[in-house]
Image (cartoon, helix red, strand yellow):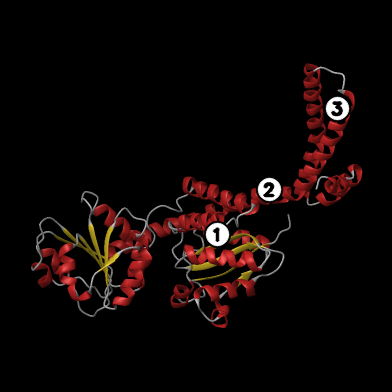
Amino acid sequence: MQETFKVLGLSFKNTPILVREKLALDEGHAKKLMKFIRDYTQASDVLVLSTCNRTEVYYNSNEDLTKEILNGISLIKGVDESAIAEYFISYSDHEGAVQRLFDVSMGLEAQVVGDLQISNQVKKAYQWSADENMAGPFLHRLMHTIFFTNKRVVQETSFRDGAASVSYATKELVEDITAKIQDPRVLILGLGEIGRDVCRNLVDSKLKNIVIANRTEEKALAMAKECNFQTVSFDNITAAIQDADVIISSIAAEQPFITKELAEKLEILSFKFFIDLSVPRSVEVAIEDVPGALVYNIDSIQNKASEALEKRTAAIPDVQRIITEAIADFNDWSKEMIVSPTIKKLKNALEDIRKEELARYLKDTDSKEAKIIDTVTKSMMQKIMKLPVLQLKAACKRGDAETLIDVLHDLFDLEKQSTESK
């Protein structure tokens, strides 16, 4: 197997969020892009990974398909190809592309190191590839190696411990404080960057009754569609706060938006939780004087996230070691794939010889004798095959398999055998 794995992509490191949002590919878009690549190129093993932080296309091809892939994305997303090309970076080095997919899948390339969501996002991308029959033996093996590596990272390091981002820490806090509430109602106020991140983190949570409110209604409707949440008009915000068990506020304002005066007008029968993610604060601290009102501010959440991030950062060397070991094993398998066709041809050539000789000498034997001879000759053939196979695999690891492949082809006329079997 030739080393032809490549990747073309953009990420938060070099692309503003406004551009990333325009180029984000949901399941339908990703599958359309894979169909486009299948129809107009010779690429195989295609994986389209698109999140709020990155859009990357991995593929196997002898040729660099940057132009073709950009053309497909521009057509599917309805954007000018020349306007997006500057953000995409191509990695045409096979080893570099494999390394990048490992690093991205483990969360080393995430905006928040060790991002807990990336593992599920990679699994979804792999499922989409399998759905479109774009995952060949190479990608299947690579992805399962990555999944096994992820398990090792979880079991052997502290890299995935704790919530290392404010938005994810918020999600965990909401799940904790509503654990004993039946069907808790959550209201998200404001859709700045942190508000959007909170929404996306809550998509995979146990919470299902989530409502979004934003001054610009179009933004609320777009985010609600992406996350499958509900919206409420900002004109009815007081009623929405009354209805919610948890209010997550990230509204940008010079003065608190949710005041003690507003809270005193609410009917709080048990508890109402206010989570303030704004700077300056959008929830007045004095609200806690109102019976049943509890306030969590960004400092307490940020401290929790910072502690987790420090632990994850300290674990990075261990994660890199595990990845290096996994890639070494995967590369050994990839090299062995080079000799697989030769092993198959050699086995078929010996099997043809065995069957020819059996046909000549078993004419006058009974079925019992024929079965014994068949079993014995099969066993002999397997033992004869064992040494060449071991030598071929050893030669792969040394990097000199080509010479041995040529010798076996000449000795057993494997090209002729391959032609006759077609």
Q: Amino acid at mark 1?
A: Asp
Q: Amino acid at mark 2?
A: Trp
Residue depicted at x 19% and y 76%: 235
Asked if the residues shown at circle 2 and circle 3 are in contact, with their CB atoms under 8 angstroms apart, the answer is: no
Q: How dense is the environment of label 1, judged by Cα within 10 Å: few (below 14), some, or many (20 and up)?
A: some
Image coordinates of residue 87 in percent, x first then y, are: 55, 77
Residue 362 falls left or right of residue 237: right
Residue depicted at x 58% and y 78%: 85
Q: How dense is the environment of label 3, judged by Cα within 10 Å: few (below 14), some, or many (20 and up)?
A: some
Image coordinates of residue 312 in percent, x first then y, are: 45, 56
Q: Which residue is mark 2?
A: 333
Residue depicted at x 61% and y 59%: 99
Q: How many marks?
A: 3
Which of the two discs, 2 and 3, labels the residue nearer the N terminus? 2
Q: Which residue is mark 1?
A: 103
* Quarter where residue 72 is shown: bottom right
Residue 70 falls left or right of residue 252: right
Q: Is residue 40 above or below residue 401?
A: below
Residue 217 falls left or right of residue 307: left
Q: How dense is the environment of label 2, judged by Cα within 10 Å: few (below 14), some, or many (20 and up)?
A: some
Image coordinates of residue 166 in percent, x first then y, are: 34, 64
Residue depicted at x 54% and y 49%: 149
- Decide if residue 7 is in sight here: no
* Quarter where residue 350 is shown: top right
Which one is in front, 109 or 91? 91
Q: Which residue is mark 3?
A: 358
Disc marking residue 386: none
Q: Nearer the viewer, mark 2 or mark 1?
A: 2
Distance between mark 2 and mark 3 Cα atoms: 35 Å
